[in-house]
Amino acid sequence: MWTANIVSKDSQVGATLITIEYTDGARVFTEARSTNGGFYSIDQLKEQIAKRIDYLNAQDTLDASLATGVVTIPEKEIPPEVDEAKEQFFADCVVLTRFKQILDLGVIKEDDPDYVKLLEKVKLSYKSEYLV
């Protein structure tokens, strides 16, 4: 588990340079950070330090799990093909259901041109295999 320690700071006009030492008890890694490099508050600096520690810990986990030898690459799953006509049919059915609701409420009449047009489209695009 890596930890961090601020070992020095050098304040200059317009910037502060901070030296941070990271250690896991056996190894040491030192890094310099500047307010010109993206942090302007102690909270932002702590976030950057936490990200570096997360990276170092993740790197150790990766290193521990790596072995030399042949790398077996899993086969990629081929996503099923999308039947766009079927998807459009069901999307139209959703809209048609909304039309039917406002028709039942009396907001529109059965001869509403948009309703009639969509109803005909759904009837023409229907295929029995869509329900399987």
Image: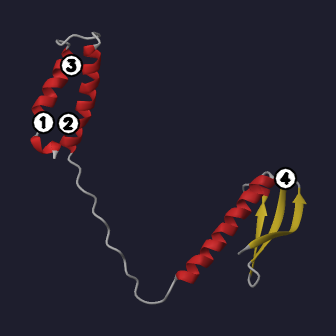
Secondary structure under the numbered disc 3 in the rendered image = helix
* Residue at image mark 3: 115
Q: CA distance from mark 4 to mark 1?
A: 70 Å
Res. 115 image quadrant: top left
Q: CA distance from mark 4 to mark 2?
A: 63 Å
Q: Earlier in the sequence, mark 4 or mark 1?
A: 4
Dot in front, 4 or 2: 2
Residue 124, above or below 68: above
Secondary structure under the numbered disc 4 in the rendered image = loop
Can you give x and y, in whole percent of width and height, for residue 114 in the image? 22, 18
Circles 3, 1 touching at the beta carbon (< 8 Å): no
Q: Earlier in the sequence, mark 3 or mark 2?
A: 2
Badge 1 amino acid: Tyr
Relative depth, front residue between 124 and 51 = 124
Dot in front, 4 or 3: 3
Residue at the (23%, 36%) spot, across then down: 90
Q: Is residue 90 left or right of residue 73?
A: left
Q: CA distance from mark 3 to mark 2?
A: 15 Å
Q: Earlier in the sequence, mark 4 or mark 3?
A: 4
Circles 1, 2 touching at the beta carbon (< 8 Å): yes
Secondary structure under the numbered disc 1 in the rendered image = loop
* Residue at image mark 1: 126
Residue at the (62%, 78%) spot, across then down: 60
* Residue at image mark 4: 14
Q: CA distance from mark 1 to mark 2?
A: 7 Å
* Residue at image mark 2: 89
Can you give x and y, in whole percent of width and height, for residue 59 in the image? 60, 75
Q: For the residue carrying disc 2, how many other residues have a C-alpha within 10 Å: few (<14), some (14-19), or many (20+)?
A: some
